[in-house]
Amino acid sequence: MQFDTFLFDLDGTLIDSLPDLTTAVNLLRGELPLPPLPQEKVAQLVGDGATMLVRRALPKEAFSDSQVQRFLTLYRAHLLDHTRIMPGIDNFLMQHQGKKMAVVTNKPYDLSLAILCELGLDPFFSAIIAGDGKHPKKPDPQPVLRALQELESLPEKALMIGDHHTDLRAGRAAGVKTCFCVFGFGNDGGEPYDYLAETPDDLLRLFPADNPW
């Protein structure tokens, strides 16, 4: 099937941000004080936005909106210490340069834009639909539908690429095909998907460019 529109999740799909997210989570826990969580555990908490990440990372009695804001402050200070492009994903983006592409993430807009700009990914994307706008977060389909609207794309010609069940649910509910990325740090949560990419290189195999460089 030929797609003219690619919608990407950010964390765990375009970028490996897990080390820096883990740093911020553990700095927050250390202030309470609570023992640090291993990176593998933090990976299980990511995917539904900062509020849910903090809620899951703290005991129920320690959670508050102010702790979410403190987490974001700590995360901003370590946003790009170790965050990198997922190996091989830049090749896919370059091969498909000129296609309609957007980032659909539950991460706040300012943090998403800062990372994309610093890593040199921003020129590939015509839209960034983030998790702090007026629309609901994934798994609600509204962020995906908003991206399609901004790109002037049809659902049947679009693909949602992500590493988390929120991406799969949002894409399916919006009427677009979905690709689950095993190489990320999310999980499919038992949600169905149309394509499976075990590595970023699989994306080019599954969706080859019309005019490869």
Image: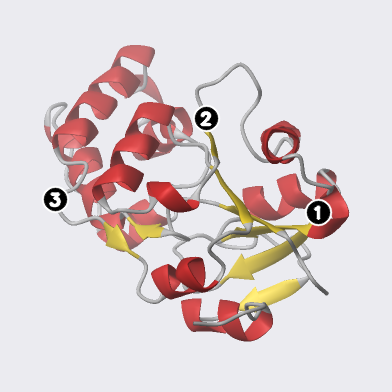
Residue denoted by label 3: 81
Q: Is residue 73 visible?
A: yes
Badge 2 density bin: few <14, some 14–19, many ≥20, Cα 10 Å:
many
Mark 2: amino acid: Gly
Q: Is residue 129 left or right of residue 155?
A: left
Q: Residue at x 61, y 31 (%)?
A: 137
Where residue 37 appears, x then y in whole percent?
Answer: 24, 51
Q: Residue at x 79, y 71 (%)?
A: 2
Q: Residue at x 75, y 50 (%)?
A: 171
User: Dot 1: what SS?
Assistant: loop
- Closer to the chain start, of discs 3 and 1, is 3
Residue 196 lies in quadrant: bottom right
Where residue 66 appears, x then y in whole percent?
Answer: 30, 13
Q: How many marks?
A: 3
Q: Are marks 2 and 3 in contact (CB under 8 Å)?
A: no
Mark 1: amino acid: Val
Mark closer to the observer (2, 1): 1
Where residue 44 appears, x then y in whole percent?
Answer: 44, 55
User: Dot 3: what SS?
Assistant: loop
Q: Is residue 201 left or right of residue 135?
A: left
**The N terminus lies in quadrant:** bottom right
- Closer to the chain start, of discs 2 and 1, is 2
Where residue 53 appears, x then y in whole percent?
Answer: 41, 37
Mark 3: amino acid: Asp
Give the distance between the C-alpha atoms of the residues marked 2 and 3, in whole angstroms: 22 Å
Badge 3 density bin: few <14, some 14–19, many ≥20, Cα 10 Å:
few
53 or 110, which lies in front?
A: 110
Residue denoted by label 1: 176
Q: Are marks 2 and 1 in contact (CB under 8 Å)?
A: no
* Residue farthest toward the bottom in the current orientation of the protein: 205
